[in-house]
Image (tube, rainbow, N blue to C red):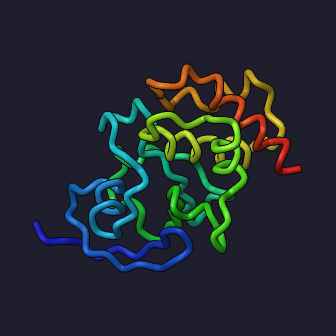
Amino acid sequence: MPKQLINLTVNGSPYEVAVEPRWTLLEMVREELRFSGSKEGCGTGDCGACSMILRGPQDGRGRLITSCLMLAAQAEGCEVTTIEGLATNGRLHPVQQAFIDTGGVQCGFCTPGMIMASKALLDRNPSPTLEEVREGLAGNLCRCTGYAKIYEAVMHASKAGK
C-alpha cells in the first residue's frame, strides 16, 4: 500500500511524515522522528509505557493516549507531546524532577509513560489526593518500584507546581 502524508506537531515542532497505513503513532514517533523515549511494553495498551499526550483540533489541554493503539494517520492535524517534549530550555519539567528527587525511577522502562500519565493527571487536577493519583496512574504498570515512590513523586510535583 502507498504511504500517506500526514502533518502534525510533535513536541512543538511541525512535521510532515509519509506513513504506512498500518503504522502506529508509537512506531512513527520512534522510527521516523527518532523520539525514542516512549517505549512499547505490551503492544496492547495495557502497560502505559507508550503514553503520550495528544491534542486534537477540538481538545483543550490534551488527553493521555496509549500510542501503540493509535494509528499514525489518526494524528493528522494533532499536537503530540512525548517525554522529550516536557523539558524546556534544558530544564526538566517539575514532574520529571519530582521523579528524580523522590527516587520514583528504577529500571526506567516505564518511567516515560508514568511521567506522561502524571503530567496529564496534574493538568486535569493540580492537587490530587493519593487515591486520585492511584486512579490516574492505574493504566501504567511498573515491575520494579512497588509504586510508593512513584505516587510520592506525583504528590511532590503537585506541591511544586503551586
29 left or right of 111? left
Question: What percent of the width, then of the height, locates residue 117?
Answer: 59, 42
Q: Residue 19: x and y, percent?
A: 25, 68
Closer to the camera in the image, 103 or 152: 103
Left or right of 135 on screen, residue 27: left
State the residue at coordinates (63%, 35%): 103
- x%, y% of residue 129? 80, 27
In this view, the residue in front, 62 or 98, is 98
**In the image: residue 100, left or right of residue 43:** right
Residue at x-position 55% and y-position 46%: 64
Q: Residue at x 68, y 57 (%)?
A: 93
* Residue 137 x/y as whole percent: 59, 31
Q: 85 or 145, which is in the foreground?
A: 145
Check the image and name the residue furthest to the right.
Answer: 162
Q: Determine whether 83 is above or below 117 in the image.
A: below
Q: Is residue 62 above or below residue 132?
A: below
Rendering quarter of residue 26: bottom left
Query: Image check: 154 left or right of 87?
Result: right
Quarter the N terminus occupies: bottom left
Quadrant in the picture for residue 98: top right
Question: How many numbered dots are placed on residues in this image?
Answer: 0
**Residue drawn 56% across the image and 74% down it:** 12
